[in-house]
Image (cartoon, helix red, strand yellow):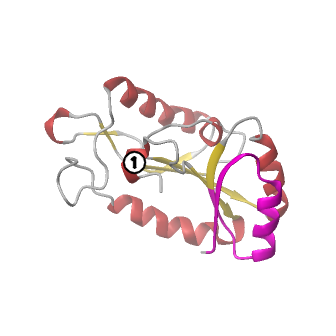
Amino acid sequence: MIYSLNGERCTSSSRLLIQGSIAEKFVEKLTARVKALKVGHPLTPVTEIGPLIHERHLAKVCSYFDVARKDGATIAVGGKPHDGPGGGHYVQPTLVTGAHSKMRVAQEEVFGPFLTVIPFKIKQFRLNCAERADADWLCETLNRECRSRDRHLSVAPDGIITLDRP
């Protein structure tokens, strides 16, 4: 998930495409989990989110809080710097909801502990993929229907897509 390694790796899943019919219930549970993430010193065993690598990177990640709000998304959790130990460059784990595939937070990599949830209807998935076909990308999608998941694989652009059942 995006929150491991602070979201600072190329294989972090920064977008969660989720079938609309299960989105509300899933996001409710996800919100509780994100709120419970422990931010702290990276060598402390209970820490799940450590500092970002550089002050400039902290500023970049924090700039996406305003981007999300300006585009009409909701910051359900986080959305602020975090006063961590030792003066490091900490940011609260952030969960963005109310997003759609045309928003910047759904199209750009933040490279921080920042997850954007994008609900979809089955017929919309092809359109969502087509809108991102210009670049390699990584996303996760949750869907109850195996046949629909197989269709997702057939229309997905280059990149990594994790298909899972809730």
Q: Label 1's element? A: loop
Q: Amino acid at mark 1?
A: Gly
Residue 103: say if magenta: no
Q: Residue 3 in the image: state x and y as whole percent.
A: 41, 52
Residue 161: say if magenta: yes
Image vertical order of residue 139 relative to residue 135, above or below: below
Q: Residue 61 in the image: state x and y as whole percent.
A: 44, 33
Image vertical order of residue 88 relative to residue 146, above or below: above
Q: Is residue 164 left or right of residue 101?
A: left
Q: Is residue 96 left or right of residue 53?
A: right
Image vertical order of residue 22 relative to residue 126, above or below: below
Give the residue pinned by disc 1.
78
Q: Residue at x 60, y 75 (%)?
A: 166
Q: Residue at x 19, y 59 (%)?
A: 45
Q: Is residue 155 left or right of residue 8?
A: right
Q: Is residue 109 left or right of residue 85?
A: right
Q: Residue at x 70, y 76 (%)?
A: 144
Q: Nearer the viewer, residue 47 or 23?
A: 47
Q: Residue at x 82, y 64 (%)?
A: 151
Magenta-highlighted residues: 140-165
